[in-house]
Image: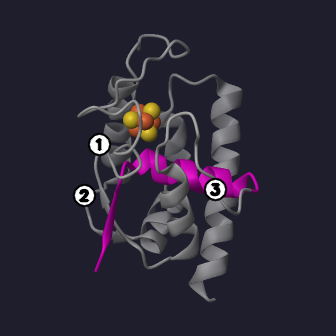
Amino acid sequence: METLTLKPHHFMDILKLYGAGVEEFVPDERLGHDFYRAGNRVLGDPSLSLTLTAGGDDICKPCRMYRGQCRDGLTHIPGYTSKDAYNRQLDSRVFSLFGLTEGPYSALELCGILYEGREKIFQVWTEEAEDAAQRRYALFTAGAEKYLKKWKNP
Ligand code: SF4
């Protein structure tokens, strides 16, 4: 069975955008990453097998910023100038707070685990302003509920 390798926070971003109303992702012309491809596969297939990583994932591999690791910079997160360092911090928090391993998990199973523990979102994105974290929480919750409802008893 084919497995997609994802950073757990990328998976959460997919569900957050689904909660915001995105039903089909489109390619990013500027960076050329595969967020759209991974997102569309997750939305369309609850049995999709996912392996988790805190490093470069299948979204990053074709990205113009990816050369062995993410080379993109950051200016809006206090204490971080490297997106790779910040992303690793986020993903290591997700792994430990939600008790995740590298898997594999089915997309539906992973959605269920993250949904059950969704209050921990506030302990992951601690550098975000409170209103941004609230919005992230609300949209993730909406997206995960929509996904679980659609696929638990299709
Ligand atoms: S390499 Fe960096 S900018 Fe590109 S998709 Fe990955 S995390 Fe995002």
Q: Is residue 70 left or right of residue 74?
A: left
| Residue corresponding to mark 2 | 102
Which sits earlier in the primary sequence, circle 2 or circle 1? 1
Asked if disc 1 is less than 8 Å from ligand 1, the answer is: no
How many residues crowd mark 2 within 10 Å: few (<14), some (14–19), many (20+)?
some
Q: x, y (%) of residue 28?
A: 58, 43
Asked if disc 3 is less than 8 Å from ligand 1, the answer is: no
Magenta span includes 10: yes
Q: Mark 3: which secondary structure?
A: loop
Query: What's under tag 1, amino acid-wise?
Result: Ala
Q: x, y (%) of residue 147?
A: 62, 70
The answer to whether residue 90 shows anywhere in this view is: no
Q: Is residue 104 above or below residue 15?
A: below
The answer for how far apart the CA atoms under marks 1 and 3 are is: 23 Å
**In the image, which disc is placed on residue 112?**
none
Q: Mark 1: which secondary structure?
A: loop
Q: Are marks 3 and 2 in contact (CB under 8 Å)?
A: no
Observer-nearest of 28 and 149: 28
Name the quarter where the C terminus is drawn: bottom right
The answer for how far apart the CA atoms under marks 3 and 2 are is: 25 Å
Name the quarter where the N terminus is drawn: bottom left
Q: x, y (%) of residue 24?
A: 67, 61
Looking at the rendered structure, the number of numbered marks drawn on it comes to 3
Magenta span includes 3: yes
Residues in magenta, as a range: 1-21
Q: x, y (%) of residue 96?
A: 30, 45
